[in-house]
Image (cartoon, grey):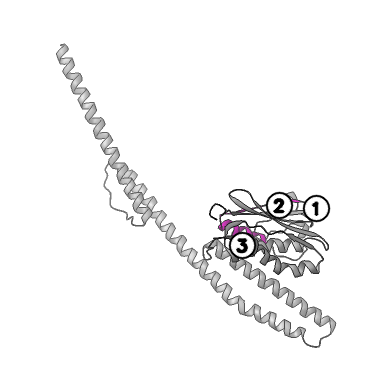
């Protein structure tokens, strides 16, 4: 009797082992098949096949439908992206000439002998045409960044020359407002796209000049903080409320303190888009009535030089 029990136990043990081995083999086969399907979906070669009512049928069919739908969605997204790119290109092309002509004709009228009231009208036309030109240009730039049409190419370079170029453009306006602009150059290398980073910095410094009263002060400070080079732009302007500091980088957003002043609310949004594309980031600290400090962080290159 004991012998038969031993034989039965051995058979059951062997059978269990075979069943476990077979189950693992089937499971591995299922996982390998699904892995192949996912890899095919990633490289774009996936094609839905016919499945029978086997053990894999339900899961495989659902997975196949999901992957097929994802592929269609990806194709649709790519198609829509191309349409947006074309639309942006069309807007840029179609508006450039009319706005340029409008500004040209306004300037020609300013040179004519006109009554004082007529001169004011022409001057206002010129100002509004300039605002429209800036708005369209900024929107096109921002949209190109968002859709990947515009690719930044960060390179290793010193930050100070770029800041000095920005200041050379902004100083005439600051001097006309009797503002003091302070900047001490330092040889700090970072990774940045020269053209677009200069535009981002210009937008911030331009705001500092715009919202700082006559006779105010603007400071630009450089600092090495390890993995980043920090550009601090500090002013003694009207400041930004705590509520607005979390919103000012949104497109078209304008705080309550500057709502009635010149501007369209796109400069800071575009600046952050540019810095983000360079693997940097921005911060702001401000006190109403005391001024604001904007911080730009660019990836440091000190370990390379």
Label 1 neighbourhood size at 10 Å, few (<14), some (14-19), many (20+)? few
Residue 266 visible in the current orientation: no
Is residue 277 found inside the magenta-colored segment of the image? yes
**Magenta stretch: includes residue 269:** yes
The answer to whether residue 283 is above or below residue 97 is above
Q: Please provide percent x and percent y for residue 134.
A: 66, 70
Which label's residue is closer to the chain start, 1 or 3? 3
| Residue ID at (24%, 26%) | 16
Location of mark 1 (residue): 290
State which tag comes first along the sequence, 1 or 2: 2
Q: Position of residue 171 (x, y in %)?
A: 74, 67
Say whether residue 160 is left or right of residue 87. right
Write the residue at 33% across / 44% down: 58
Q: Quadrant of residue 14?
A: top left
For residue 197, the mark is 3
Mark 2 to mark 3: distance in Å?
Answer: 22 Å
Q: What range of the chain is rendered magenta?
A: 267-288
The local crowd at label 2, few if under 14, some if 14 to 19, many if 20 or more residues have their Cα within 10 Å, is some
Q: Are marks 2 and 3 in contact (CB under 8 Å)?
A: no
Residue at 69%, 79% (x, y): give it.
Answer: 103
Q: Which mark is residue 245?
A: 2
């Amino acid at each position: 009797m004991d012998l038969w029990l031993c034989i039965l136990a051995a058979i059951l043990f062997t059978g269990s082992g075979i069943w476990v081995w077979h189950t693992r083999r089937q499971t591995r086969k299922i996982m390998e098949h699904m892995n192949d399907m996912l890899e095919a979906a990633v490289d774009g070669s996936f094609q839905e096949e016919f499945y029978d009512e086997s053990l894999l049928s339900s899961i495989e069919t659902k997975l196949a439908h999901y992957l097929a739908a994802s592929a269609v969605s990806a194709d649709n997204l790519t198609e829509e992206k191309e349409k947006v790119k074309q639309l942006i290109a069309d807007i840029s092309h179609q508006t450039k000439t009319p706005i340029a002509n409008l500004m040209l004709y306004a300037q020609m009228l300013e040179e004519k002998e006109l009554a004082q009231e007529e001169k004011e009208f022409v001057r206002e036309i010129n100002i509004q045409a300039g605002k429209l030109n800036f708005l369209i240009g900024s929107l096109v730039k921002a949209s190109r960044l968002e859709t990947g049409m515009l690719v930044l190419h960060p390179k290793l370079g010193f930050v100070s020359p770029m800041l000095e170029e920005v200041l050379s453009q902004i100083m005439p306006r600051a001097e006309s407002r009797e503002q003091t602009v302070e900047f001490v150059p330092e040889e700090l290398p970072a990774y940045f796209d020269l053209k677009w980073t200069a535009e981002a910095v210009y937008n911030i410094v331009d705001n500092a000049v715009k919202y700082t009263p006559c006779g105010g002060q603007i400071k630009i400070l450089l600092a090495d903080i390890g993995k980043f080079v920090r550009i601090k732009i500090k002013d003694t302007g009207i400041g930004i409320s705590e509520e607005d500091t979390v919103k000012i980088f949104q497109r078209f957003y304008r705080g309550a303190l500057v709502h009635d002043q010149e501007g369209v609310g796109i400069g800071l949004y575009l600046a952050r888009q540019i810095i983000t594309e360079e693997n940097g980031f921005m911060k702001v600290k401000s006190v109403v009535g005391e001024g604001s400090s904007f911080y730009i962080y660019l990836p440091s290159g000190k370990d390379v030089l």
